[in-house]
């Protein structure tokens, strides 16, 4: 997991796919339409979404196998909950078509809480169980977010 400012992305030697993903994030604004945005076919694409955050912590995490998630906010504020996926119970088995499985949140959470606001990002890998929708610094509210899906093999180039 990497959590940093978008202004520091040149510090990460993650290859051209990561650089394209960051360029895409920098091009977004409040008027960017929601939905899927093609960047480089199935190797690199983004989902732009709007939703309301919640005061309560999520009860399950998601994990992926084929893609890393590069998450950044366009508007609003959100707490992203993350932790190691090791040892978490499976609630919904891995779905290859959606590249997603859901894992149960244990009673002893041990989460890392990442505050996402415009200008910063979180890059999450398959070992990083994560779930957004947590209230941001000013409480629950509406946000606009982009999740860029970067194929893991594209990060190695």
Image (cartoon, grey):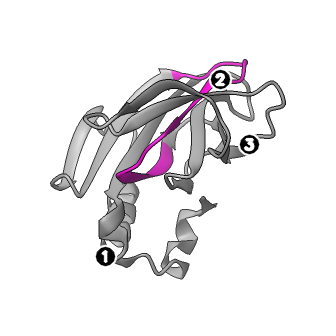
**Circle 3 crowding by C-alpha within 10 Å: few under 14, some 14–19, many from 20:** some
- Give the percent coordinates (x, y) of residue 78: 63, 35
Q: Which residue is mark 3?
A: 113
- Give the percent coordinates (x, y) of residue 59: 65, 21
Q: Judge whether 67 appears above or below 23 on screen.
A: above
> 31 or 153, which lies in front?
153
> 8 or 93, which lies in front?
93
**Circle 2 crowding by C-alpha within 10 Å: few under 14, some 14–19, many from 20:** some
> 82 or 36, which lies in front?
82
| Distance in Å between CA atoms under marks 1 and 3 | 29 Å
Tell me the residue at 60%/62% (across/down): 2
Q: Which residue is mark 1?
A: 16
Quick one: SS at disc 2? Answer: loop
The circle on residue 58 is 2
User: Horizontal placement of 42 versus 138: left or right?
Assistant: left
> Would you say residue 46 is visible in this rendering?
yes
- Sooner in the amino-acid sequence: mark 2 or mark 3: 2
Determine whether label 1 and label 3 are within 8 Å by CB: no
| Distance in Å between CA atoms under marks 2 and 1 | 33 Å
């Amino acid at each position: 997991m990497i959590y940093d400012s978008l202004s520091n992305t040149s510090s990460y030697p993650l290859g051209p796919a990561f650089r394209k993903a960051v360029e895409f994030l920098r091009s977004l604004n409040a008027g960017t339409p929601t939905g899927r945005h093609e960047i480089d076919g199935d190797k690199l694409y983004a989902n732009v979404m709007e939703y309301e955050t919640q005061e309560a912590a999520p009860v399950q995490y998601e994990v992926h196998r084929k893609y890393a998630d590069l998450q950044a906010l366009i508007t609003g504020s959100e707490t992203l909950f993350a932790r190691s996926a090791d040892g978490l119970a499976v609630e919904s088995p891995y779905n290859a078509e959606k590249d997603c499985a859901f894992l149960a949140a244990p009673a002893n959470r041990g989460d890392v809480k990442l505050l996402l606001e415009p200008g910063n990002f979180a890059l999450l890998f398959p070992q990083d169980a994560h779930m957004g929708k947590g209230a941001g610094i000013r409480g629950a509210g509406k946000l606009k977010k982009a999740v860029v899906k970067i194929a893991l093999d594209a990060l190695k180039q």
